[in-house]
Amino acid sequence: VAVSLRGARRELDERTAPLAGLVAAFIFAVQMLNFPVAAGTSGHLLGGALAAILVGPYTGVLCVSVVLLMQGILFADGGLTALGVNITVMGVVTVVTAHLLFRGLLRVLPTTRRSVTAAGFVAALLSVPAAAAAFTAVYAVGGTTDVPLGKVLTAMVGVHLLIGIGEALITAATVGAVIAVRPDLVHGARALATPLKLRVGGALVDAPAPAPAPAAPAAGGPTKKVWVTGLATTLVLAGFVSFYASADPDGLEKVAADKGIDAKVEEHAAAGSPLADYGVEDVDDPRLSGGLAGVIGVGVTVVAGTGVFWAVRRRTAEQPAAATSAPAA
């Protein structure tokens, strides 16, 4: 996380920092939407690949870390003593795996928007079983039960390969939607901004660079529109669509129960939280309780994430106007 905080300075600026906070909130919301993958098993977005493609690998690790921290503290989801393991497996491993695969694929694919979306699909698909394999490695070092390592690896990678399909579909759909509107805001689509070539005398030469447009008026309005639209979508997902999520245990919970590796599980330290288990305390209606909890979670995550990313953003030095004017001949 410390390395990511330092590296994120090169990925964030005044325009992209709020968008990174929105990405964290979106991941939080979509992680509430468990989808069925097999009999009695569900899966949900991990988000590492999506974050790496949209805002960059360093910022991507921070996005997932913020989500996991909010889930652990407010919603009793993910043990606080397991926070380091969760960030490593769900954040670092997924982001690094997806980023390397994504960049490698873009080197061999045509430089098009479809290539970015396709590369995102493959990177997201394989990042999930990679995280499952990493969890198995952690279990090999610190597991507290006698379940054979081979059984854990086979079960984890098998079910998470299925979950990876859902991860890939969500990632590709989200990346494709953002690229269609504002490709300049997608970190992984920067290769699309290749210099314009002109054919002069049978040879290709770089076209003259256009005069830079005023940054603030050009970017401020459209960026704000994307942010508002994205936040509204995120709130709908967390506040309404989440009620229809699968109630089956996710891949890790299912494998842990089936193989007996949860024999020594303990009650969560934040089990008494008024938002524990994604419900608002003393609100009897399950739909309203879950919806309110989702909206609160999105709000807290977007505020916390934006605050972190705004603090570590790259600060552009302002030069005085007199320094930019050439002296008279």
Image (cartoon, rainbow, N blue to C red):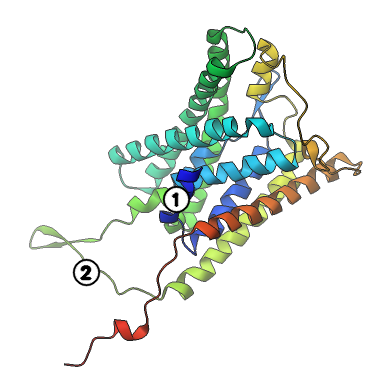
Which residue is rendered at x = 59% and y = 32% of the image? 86
Which residue is rendered at x = 74% and y = 43% of the image? 74
| Residue annotated with mark 1 | 6
Whether residue 30 can be seen here: no
Q: Is residue 292 left or right of residue 126?
A: right
Q: Amino acid at mark 2?
A: Pro
**As drawn, 193 above or below 325:** above
Q: Amino acid at mark 1?
A: Arg
Q: Is residue 207 left or right of residue 283?
A: left
**As drawn, 164 above or below 173:** above
Query: Which is more N-terminal, label 1 or label 2?
Result: 1
Q: For the residues marked 2 and 1, what is the alpha-carbon distance in whole angstroms?
A: 35 Å
- Can you give x and y, in whole percent of width and height, for residue 96 in the image? 43, 36
- Can you give x and y, in whole percent of width and height, for residue 52 in the image? 47, 43
Q: Residue pushed farthest bottom?
A: 328
Q: Check disc 1 and report its element: helix, strand or loop.
A: helix
Q: Is residue 105 left or right of residue 240?
A: left
**Other residues around mark 1 within 10 Å, as few (<14) / some (14–19) / many (≥20):** some
- Can you give x and y, in whole percent of width and height, for residue 178 in the image? 50, 52
* Quadrant (top left/top right/bottom left/bottom right) for the C terminus: bottom left
Residue contact between numbered discs 2 and 1, judged by CB atoms under 8 Å: no
Q: Residue pushed farthest left?
A: 201
- Can you give x and y, in whole percent of width and height, for residue 249 in the image? 71, 24
| Residue annotated with mark 2 | 208
In the picture, the disc for residue 68 is none
Q: Check disc 2 and report its element: helix, strand or loop.
A: loop
